[in-house]
Amino acid sequence: MKKLQILGTGCAKCKKLTEETEKAAKELGIEYSLEKITDIEKIMSFAVMSTPALVIDGIVKVAGHVPEHDVLIKLLL
Amino acid sequence: MTYSFFLLAKESRIASAVQFFLYDTPKVLMLLVLIVFLVGIIRSFFTPERTRHILSGKKESLGNVLAALLGVVTPFCSCSAVPLFIGFVTTGIPLGVTFSFLISAPMVNEVALVLLYGLFGWKVALIYLSTGLFIAIISGWIIGRLKLEKYVADWVYKTPQAKSSINSEVINWDNRIQLGLDAVKDIVGKVWPYIILGIGVGAGIHGYVPANFMASIMGKGAWWSVPLAVLIGVPMYSNAAGIIPIVQALLGKGAALGTVLAFMMSVIALSVPEMIILKKVLKPPLIAIFVAIVATGIMIVGYLFNFLF
């Protein structure tokens, strides 16, 4: 079970990262939980400097952009 | 071509407006695609993390200059302003230097720069670039001198320092070109309706407003036109690309260069949505000081150019 968290204050890119991540996770058929974090103080507690960011099992894997589909697949494996 | 196609008299105002529209729309859009692509590639070399690394440990005055310059080439969107702000100040980058970056990033916009070059020539483009950087450097420097750290929201300094080892993905030229193409899809895809609308407004002014109408309200003679332009511009929000055609039309109709530049800069650099975002990390007095300093800088530039040209 992977714990996925999307950090972002709700801009268009954040929504896209959420969609793309879910798509990749479903394609892989992994079990996951997805949480969107929009509170700026909580976002900053992950020590990122740009949003949107993707956190997998507590580790920041992507920050500031929406990665390509195959990159996401690799990150989620 | 325009005339025969629409069967309009050459002198007619509609013909003049339609010609302006048909000639400028493809020109501006093509230029935009090319530039956004190139800038997308340039930006792949500068991440916020790298910019922060360059800025950390720099002395304040040099830091202000560097921050303003890096503001131009670092990828930045207003939704990232807050994390970036916090990332900077928690690594010990002075508040004033951080502001130089935050002012220059939206104001000195490379899309606007090249559009200005394409439409008005290198002089106007250079003026825009140098005055934009100047305002960012000086405003940041003043904010640094005023020691306003107490007006930063308290939780900001308690935030853990942002790591800079996230972007470990290897980036090659294929990726960079892809990033350039993504930027085109993303930015041009978003701004084209505004550009067409902007040119449309421009065409309307071109065809219908008497040539000296603007000169009387935005010309050199009216001293109050510069502050008025800033006052109108601040609450307005447009990206740099969308405002250019309006600028073009205003200038073409006799508005003074400094006044138009002041209007454009205040629309791009200061906006209500941005203030709302910044309110999460800055206390109201600091936001007010920030707006006042930048607006004053823009007005000085406006007067300076009305005086020079």
Image (cartoon, coloured by chain):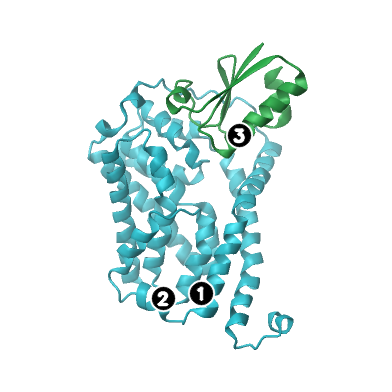
Chain colours: A green, B cyan
Estimate the spatial distance between the alpha carbons at disc 3 and disc 1, rounded to whole Å: 39 Å
Q: Write down the residue under mark 2.
A: B214
| Label 1 to label 2: alpha-carbon separation | 9 Å
How far across and down, in percent of the image, does residue B100 sit? 37, 43
Percent of width and height locating residue B197: 58, 63
Q: What residue is drawn where x is 45% and y is 60%?
A: B126
Label 1 neighbour load within 10 Å: few <14, some 14-19, many 20+: many
Q: Position of residue B278 (x, y in %)?
A: 39, 38
Give me the disc on residue A15: 3
* Residue B168 showing in the rendered view: yes
Place residue A61 in its image quadrant.
Answer: top right
The residue under label 2 is which amino acid type?
Met
> Relative to residue B186, is residue B108 drawn left or right?
left
Q: Nearer the viewer, residue A10 or B249?
A: A10
Q: Is residue B47 above or below residue B35?
A: above
Q: Earlier in the sequence, mark 1 or mark 2?
A: 1
Do discs 2 and 3 belong to a common subunit? no
Q: Please give the chain letter of the residue carrying mark 2.
A: B
User: What is the secondary structure assignment of the residue under circle 2?
Assistant: helix
Residue under numbered circle 1: B205
Q: Amino acid at mark 3?
A: Lys
Quadrant holding the N terminus of chain B:
bottom right
Whether residue B219 is situated above or below residue A42 in the rendered picture: below
Q: Residues within 10 Å of mark 2 (few under 14, many from 20)?
A: some
Residue B52 or residue A1, whichever sits in front: A1
Letter of the chain that mark 1 sits on in the rendering: B
Taking the spot 60% from the left edge, 86% from the top edge, the residue there is B12
Vertical side of B294 occupied by B29: above or below: below
1 and 2 marks in contact (CB < 8 Å): yes
Q: CA distance from mark 2 to mark 3?
A: 43 Å
